[in-house]
């Protein structure tokens, strides 16, 4: 492989990384760079881009909001991420694992029974 081709590849990979950090997915990046999306996915896995994209500050903010009593939906709206992302941010934290003591979960079974009874009664 000549050094010219190698330099173009490095440049293309750097450009792909820049687009990824802007929020584009692999298919969008592939179209912009006129390469296969699998090539872009290869760049992503080699460079561990997903780990670099998720800011730690968002994880801590999600945890702080959760500890303050915010629901997933409220956290989602504040951080402008999906509920799944909020769940993934929280699932590795110690406080989240001890959800049995969470006041938001108390009475949940009772509320579900009441809702079911109300639906059956209608």
Image: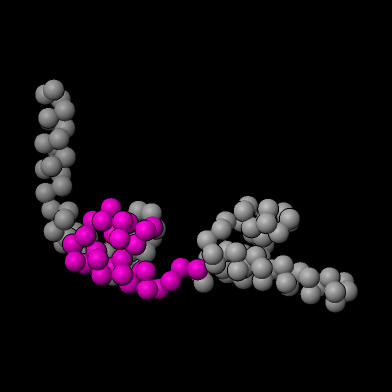
- Residue at the location (68% across, 56% down)? 32
Give residue 58's position: percent from left, percent from top. Answer: 37, 69
* Part of the protein shown in magenta: 53-81
Relative to 47, 117 lies left or right? left
Res. 87 in view? no
Question: Quadrant of residue 55 in the image?
Answer: bottom left
Which of the two residues, 102 or 68, is positioned nearer the viewer here? 68
Give residue 9's position: percent from left, percent from top. Answer: 76, 69
Which of the two residues, 62 or 97, is positioned nearer the viewer here? 62
Give residue 42's position: percent from left, percent from top. Answer: 67, 62
Give residue 59's position: percent from left, percent from top. Answer: 36, 69
The main secondary structure of the magenta stretch is: helix
Q: Is residue 117 above or below residue 18?
A: above
Question: Quadrant of residue 12 in the image?
Answer: bottom right
Magenta stretch: includes residue 38: no
- Residue at the location (34% across, 62% down)? 79
């Amino acid at each position: 492989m000549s050094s010219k081709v190698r330099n173009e590849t490095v440049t293309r990979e750097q450009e792909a990384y820049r687009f990824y950090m802007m929020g584009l997915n692999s298919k969008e990046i592939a179209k912009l760079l006129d390469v296969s999306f699998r090539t872009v996915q290869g760049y992503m896995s080699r460079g561990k881009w997903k780990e670099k994209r998720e800011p730690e500050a968002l994880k801590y903010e999600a945890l702080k909001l959760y500890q303050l009593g915010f629901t997933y939906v409220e956290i989602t709206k504040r951080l402008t991420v999906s509920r799944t992302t909020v769940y993934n941010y929280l699932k590795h934290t110690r406080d989240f694992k001890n959800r049995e003591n969470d006041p938001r979960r108390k009475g949940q079974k009772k509320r579900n029974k009441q809702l079911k009874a109300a639906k059956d009664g209608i």
